[in-house]
Image (spheres, helix red, strand yellow):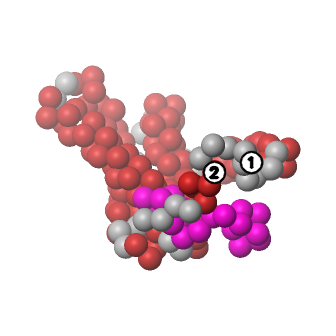
């Protein structure tokens, strides 16, 4: 968005590719850590820990597996090619999808312990989500308006401008 509006004239496809690599790597890391934790608790069969996943799998099954598949498989499949990592539309779409599914992940962390075994999704949850989105946008946009987006006089600025893969 900022690139197309001319706010970041020095950002090129190689910079977008690096951003795509980070998104790809962090989504794979998240999936690996999540699955490792799940597998570790299942394998050790510690009753206090198995209850955590059992409540989520039994009663929040759809959200549980949708969150896992979208957080791991969608970025893995979409961000695999070089062209999609260099396309800002794909990066924005996958980034929004990752944020939404991480919100579902946080929902699954909290709700079984607070609501019990009956999942609920209503106006309160939507309001909290919209409140956090609004707060995030407010903080980011007001701080971006206070300072220039591009740095000046940085020792590695010239190297960064001419970055290629």
Residue 129, x across and y down, in percent: 66, 48
Within 10 Å of disc 2 (Cα), the crowding (few <14, some 14-19, many 20+) is: some
**Residue 83 visible to an observer of this rendering:** yes
Q: Earlier in the sequence, mark 1 or mark 2?
A: 1
Q: Which residue is mark 2?
A: 157
Q: Could you tell me which quadrant the N terminus lies in?
A: bottom right
Identify the secondary structure beneath mark 2.
helix
In the image, taking residue 81 as reference, residue 108 lies left or right, namely right
In the rendered structure, does residue 15 fall within the stretch colored magenta?
Answer: yes
Q: Mark 1 near mark 2, Cβ–Cβ under 8 Å?
A: yes
Q: Residue at image x 54%, y 70%?
A: 13
Left or right of 49 in this view: 26: right
Question: Residue reaching furthest bottom?
Answer: 83
Labels in figure, total: 2
Most foreground residue, 26 or 111: 26
Q: Residue at x 63, y 51 (%)?
A: 157
- Relative image position of residue 56 (x, y in whole percent): 36, 42
Q: Position of residue 51 (x, y in %)?
A: 29, 31
Q: Residue at x 46, y 31 (%)?
A: 113
Q: Is residue 64 above or below residue 33?
A: below
**Residue 12 at x, y = what percent?**
59, 68
In magenta stretch: residue 56? no
* Residue annotated with mark 1: 152
Compared to 89, does 48 lie above or below?
Answer: above
Q: Which mark is residue 100?
A: none
Q: Distance from label 1 to label 2 (Cα)?
A: 8 Å
User: In front here: 131 or 9?
Assistant: 9
Q: Residues within 10 Å of mark 1 (few under 14, many from 20)?
A: few
Please report the bounds of the magenta region as a residue range.
1-21
Residue at left 82%, top 45%? 147
Q: Is residue 54 visible?
A: no
Quarter holding the C terminus is bottom left
């Amino acid at each position: 968005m900022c690139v197309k509006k001319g706010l970041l004239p020095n950002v090129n496809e190689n910079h977008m590719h690096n951003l795509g690599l980070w998104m790809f790597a962090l989504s794979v890391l998240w999936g690996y850590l999540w699955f490792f934790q799940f597998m570790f608790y299942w394998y050790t069969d510690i009753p206090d820990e198995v209850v955590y996943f059992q409540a989520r799998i039994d009663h929040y099954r759809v959200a549980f597996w949708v969150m896992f598949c979208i957080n791991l498989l969608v970025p893995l499949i979409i961000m695999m090619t070089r062209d999609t990592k260099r396309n800002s539309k794909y990066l924005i779409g996958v980034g929004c999808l990752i944020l939404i599914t991480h919100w579902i992940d946080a929902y699954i962390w909290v709700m079984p312990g607070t609501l019990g075994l009956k999942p609920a999704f209503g106006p309160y949850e939507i309001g909290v989500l919209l409140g956090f989105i609004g707060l995030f946008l407010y903080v980011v946009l007001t701080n971006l308006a206070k300072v220039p987006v591009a740095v000046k006089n940085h020792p590695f600025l010239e190297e960064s401008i001419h970055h290629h893969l």
